[in-house]
Amino acid sequence: MRLLIVEDHIKINNLLAKFARQEHHQVKQAYCAEEALEIMKSINFDLIITDLMLPDMQGEELIETVRKVSDVYIMVISAKTDVNDRVDLLNLGADDYLTKPF
């Protein structure tokens, strides 16, 4: 599986990548939304795991941008715990939601 991790917290990003690679997934790492969008221009992914609070763009905007060009599976990881926030993200185009800490 080709996986893109979009997380600005380096330790969390590296941890997710490490576990995915141990399962023999092909992993690319991005630390901001713009970097992720640039990587997506040259690689088709099976899954994107993204945080919502990114330094250059909110995760919601990233999801909207990705949805304009791809139907890739998007999993959100975030500290937001409100049920309405989760529902809004799913309606926006996210496919799954995992609350931090996980």
Image (cartoon, rainbow, N blue to C red):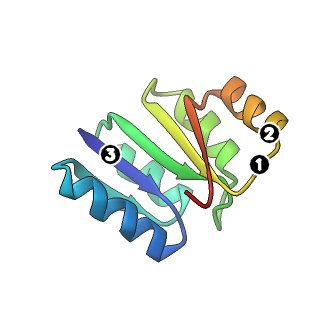
| Residue found 71% across the figure and 23% down from its top | 91
Which residue has dot 2 on it?
Answer: 85
Q: Is residue 97 left or right of residue 92?
A: left
Q: CA distance from mark 1 to mark 2?
A: 7 Å
Disc 1 secondary structure class:
loop
Q: Determine whether label 1 and label 2 are within 8 Å by CB.
A: yes
Count of residue discs = 3
| Residue found 38% across the figure and 67% down from its top | 15
| Residue found 75% across the figure and 29% down from its top | 87
User: Which label sits on residue 3?
Assistant: 3
Placement of 96 over or under 102, stated as above or below:
above
* Mark 2 or 3, nearer chain start: 3
Instruction: In the displayed orientation, state which residue is furthest to the bottom.
Output: 11
Which residue has dot 1 on it?
Answer: 81
Q: Is residue 50 left or right of residue 26?
A: right
Disc 3 secondary structure class:
strand
- Report x, y in % for residue 9: 54, 72
- Name the residue type under label 3: Leu
* Quarter of the image that includes the N terminus: top left
Badge 3 local density, few (<14 within 10 Å), some, or many (20+)? many
Q: CA distance from mark 1 to mark 3?
A: 25 Å
